[in-house]
Every structure is written in structure tokens, then in C-alpha cells.
């Protein structure tokens, strides 16, 4: 099946920009604990990467990881995400905003490693793939990026689906209400709606579909 690699990649980048905006707003929402005196301050988080943190300090870039600079990076990151969609619409190169998002993703991975769950890791892979594809002038570079993203997505989500298929808690719907009760991934309003409408079988269908597509 033939497809236009450039247009397809631009669609991926537009969807990716939405993810970048949402994840950035999530960080802003918890910015109190990111402050220099907070639980997730750079003073504490640099212990996750002591050698990298020491190198950053030696080259006098430690100030970049403090709260005020982190907030500036996040705000610019949101603006760059909006620019991607705008540039796609006006048919302008998205390389510049993508490069900022590329490097800011690495920055935030070092600055706030605890927030990088599976979805963030998948988004990072897509960001790196899209950026590298835009850097390559040859047309086949974009095709390779698309095929890689498709393969990676299929592997990641199919693996997750197959693992869920083997767990009784996913099959009978017990896990969904428990997850929705947690502080990290929970939503009591959504939980109440699901229980009221008896939508738990739908989640089993999603798990089955994810594992077999």
C-alpha cells in the first residue's frame, strides 16, 4: 500500500504535539514539588544521575536544572508544540520546534525521571524518531521513521495487551476500578460513571483488542 511519508509524518507530529502539551501541563500542575525546596527538586533528583549531575555542575550548567529555568523550558516546550501544528498547516518546516522538544525531552528526563511512565517513554521514542526523520533530507528517511514508529507501537501495545489477557483481574474487570481509585491514575468521577453505566465489559474488550490486533 502506497502512502505519502511526509504527510503521514506530519500527522504523527500533530498528534505528538498534543501529547507534549498535555504532559507539559501535567508538570506545571505539580510545580510546587518541583521547586528548589520541594520533594522533586533538582537537588534531590540529581542523585539519580550522580555522574551526569557532577558533569553538568563542572561545565557550569547546573543552574539550568533549577525550578525557574525548568518552568521556562516547559512553557517554551508548550509554545513549540503549538508551532508544530501551525507549521504543518502552512506547510513550513517543523524541524526547529521539533529540535527544541527533542532536547527538552532529554532535559526533563534528567530533571524529573520519576514522571516517565510507559506513555512518556513511548512519546520520547516518537519524538526522537520524528526529529531524526526531519533532519534527513532523503525521502526514505521519513518512510523508515513511519515504519519504525508503527513497529514500536505494535510491539509495545500488543505486549501490554497480551500480558493483560493472562491476568484474571483484567478479565473480570477488577483492576479497572482499583486503578481509578488511585491518586496517580485515578478519577472518581469517571469511576462513578463507569459503574453507573456498567461499562467494565468495554474495558475487557479493549484489552482483548489490544492483545490481538
Image: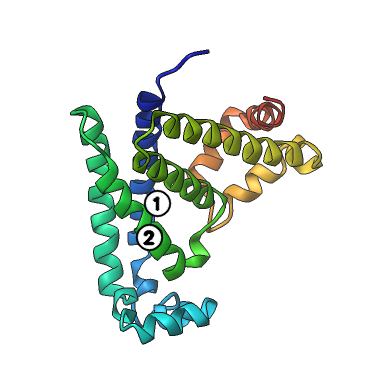
Hey, which quadrant is residue 207 in on the image? top right
SS at badge 1: helix
Label count reads 2
What whole-number distance in Å separates the C-alpha atoms at marks 1 and 2?
A: 6 Å
The answer to whether one can see residue 195 in this image is no
Percent position of residue 16, x then y: 39, 40
131 to 206, vertically: above or below? below
Residue at 69% x, 45% y is 175
Percent position of residue 35, x then y: 34, 76
The answer to whether one can see residue 47 in this image is yes
Tell me whether circle 1 and circle 2 mark residues in contact (CB < 8 Å).
Answer: yes
Which residue lies most toward the top here? 1
Residue at 29% x, 80% y is 63
Which residue lies most toward the left here? 90
Q: Which residue is mark 1?
A: 23
Q: Which residue is mark 2?
A: 27
Q: Relative to the observer, which residue lies in front, 66 or 96? A: 96
| Classed neighbour count for the residue bearing mark 2: other residues with Cα under 10 Å, few (<14), some (14–19), many (≥20) | some
Q: Relative to the observer, which residue lies in front, 176 or 151? A: 151
Quadrant of the rendering where the C terminus is positioned: top right
Amino acid at each position: 500500500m502506497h502512502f505519502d511519508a511526509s504527510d503521514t509524518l506530519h500527522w504523527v507530529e500533530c498528534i505528538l504535539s498534543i501529547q507534549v502539551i498535555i504532559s507539559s501541563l501535567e508538570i506545571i500542575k505539580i510545580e510546587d514539588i518541583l521547586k528548589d525546596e520541594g520533594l522533586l527538586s533538582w537537588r534531590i533528583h540529581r542523585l539519580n544521575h550522580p555522574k551526569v549531575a557532577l558533569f553538568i555542575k563542572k561545565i557550569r550548567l547546573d543552574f539550568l536544572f533549577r525550578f525557574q529555568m525548568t518552568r521556562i523550558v516547559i512553557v517554551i516546550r508548550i509554545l513549540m508544540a503549538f508551532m508544530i501544528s501551525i507549521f504543518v498547516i502552512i506547510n513550513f518546516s517543523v524541524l526547529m520546534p521539533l529540535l527544541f522538544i527533542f532536547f527538552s525531552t532529554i532535559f526533563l528526563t534528567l530533571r524529573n525521571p520519576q514522571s516517565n511512565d510507559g506513555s512518556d517513554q513511548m512519546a520520547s521514542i516518537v519524538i526522537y524518531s520524528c526529529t531524526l526523520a526531519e533532519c534527513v533530507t532523503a525521502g526514505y528517511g521519513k518512510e523508515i521513521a513511519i515504519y519504525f514508529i508503527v513497529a514500536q507501537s505494535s510491539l509495545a501495545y500488543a505486549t501490554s495487551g497480551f500480558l493483560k489477557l493472562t491476568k484474571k483481574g483484567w478479565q473480570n474487570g477488577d483492576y479497572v476500578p482499583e486503578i481509578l481509585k488511585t491518586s496517580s491514575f485515578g478519577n472518581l468521577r469517571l469511576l462513578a460513571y463507569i459503574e453507573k453505566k456498567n461499562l467494565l465489559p468495554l474495558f475487557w474488550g479493549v484489552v482483548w483488542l489490544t492483545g490481538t490486533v
